[in-house]
Amino acid sequence: MKCSTGGEAAAKALIDLGVEYVFTLTGGHLNHIHLHLENSPVKIITARHEQGATFMADAYGRMTGRPGVAMLTAGPGFTNSLTPIMHAMFCNTPLLVIAGAAGIEFRDKLDLQDAPQIASVTPMVKKAFVCTQASRVAEYVEMAYRTAYTGRPGPVFLELPCDVLGAAIPGGEAPYFKTEVVSQPVDRASARKTVELLRKARKPIVVAGTGAGVAKAGPELQKFIESAQIPLYTINMARGIVSDEHPYCFGLAHPSRNGAATRAYLEADLVVILGHRISLTEFFGGLINKDATVVQVDIEAEELGRNRQIELPVVSDVRAFVEEMNEIRPLAVCVLGGLRAQRKEEVRRRAQHRRDQRQAPHQSAAPRAGARQLPG
């Protein structure tokens, strides 16, 4: 990549990566990048507070599935972003936070807004990078951006000291290796085992969480529940990937807001969890029938078995896994159809009851005796 300074290398890398927006509240530490983003395809969105800028980037990442990019000045500008960074970590949002920093030559000399940024943010992110060579700035920007969206998405931090951004690149040429990762892992053997478990189950349910939403598994999941005739519950970023109006989607998988979910967890003999962490929502696993067989599918192995024993733990991309089960589905459709006929009619009746309730005219409660009435 042809570029004269570290700041130009950072700007050109962001442009080449197809970044649409940079959310920022700039400061002097970032001037070398902003100079080269002016009049570029990248739109600069300026906030009034760094926390707001980083939350904007978080929202962009959550809605698009592509890393949102926040760019902040050093020290207190950076520390204002810690709450949205932690939020992105809990919610698995692809987020890239780029912060300026005091020059390397002036570290620990009480330079302007010098702060231990890497030490502060490391526990809150997938990975924290710091680049100390102008010739490698573009390489680091690409690596940090790619880390944010591959595997389980999450926030990534990149520190670029101001003297590195202002330094000349020898020869005017910087190494830049762009790799776009679209391949997703799938466990075919476990997909077949899951289908076999479905053949034997009498009261199976499917719970789809953020991993299903991030993987954009909606069409595949709808095809699967229609073929297998299985009730679906959704939560977090999976809400809406299959409409609650669908006869096999029973709404929110949260016991505090959906009594159907509570009963389903307690009575199910097979629970297939797709991209959802077992946590407080399921009373740390206590809500799930202790005699049920649980299949848990997640892109991140560390989530498998948290708070409950999992009979079939699966490391896989959710969409790829459901696609694989859909390929196997014709082998089992006649068996599943026989087992599910009664369940299908029950689902249909419940769905019709829900529609009737929504369409019924609202009836105001009669005022109690002696209550004061507002004038008409």
Image (cartoon, grey):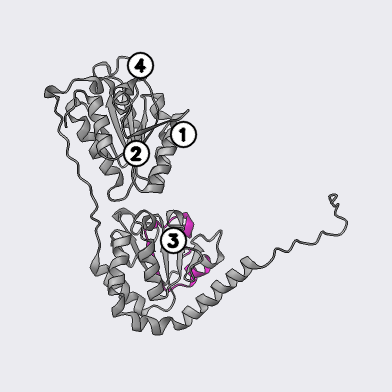
Could you tell which of marks 3 and 1 lies nearer the N-terminus? 1
Q: Is residue 363 above or below residue 134?
A: below
Q: Nearer the viewer, residue 365 or 266?
A: 365
Amino acid type shown at disc 2: Glu
Could you tell which of marks 3 and 4 lies nearer the N-terminus? 4
On the image, which quarter does residue 234 sit in? Answer: bottom left
Identify the residue under disc 2: 20
Residue occupying the point 34% across, 56% down: 215
On the image, which quarter does residue 79 sit in? Answer: top left
Residue neighbourhood size for the residue with mark 1, other residues' Cα within 10 Å, grouped as few (<14), some (14–19), many (≥20): some
Residue neighbourhood size for the residue with mark 4, other residues' Cα within 10 Å, grouped as few (<14), some (14–19), many (≥20): some
Label 4 – label 1 distance at C-alpha: 23 Å
Residue neighbourhood size for the residue with mark 2, other residues' Cα within 10 Å, grouped as few (<14), some (14–19), many (≥20): some
Q: Is residue 76 rendered to the left or right of residue 322?
A: right
Question: Is residue 117 at all visible to an observer of this figure?
Answer: yes
Could you tell which of marks 3 and 2 lies nearer the N-terminus? 2
Amino acid type shown at disc 3: Gly
Where disc 2 sits, the SS reads loop
The reply to whether callout 4 and callout 2 are in contact (CB within 8 Å) is no
Residue 370: x percent and y percent?
A: 88, 56
Where disc 1 sits, the SS reads helix
Q: Nearer the viewer, residue 108 or 176?
A: 176
Residue neighbourhood size for the residue with mark 3, other residues' Cα within 10 Å, grouped as few (<14), some (14–19), many (≥20): some
Identify the residue under disc 1: 52
Identify the residue under disc 3: 285
Identify the residue under disc 4: 112
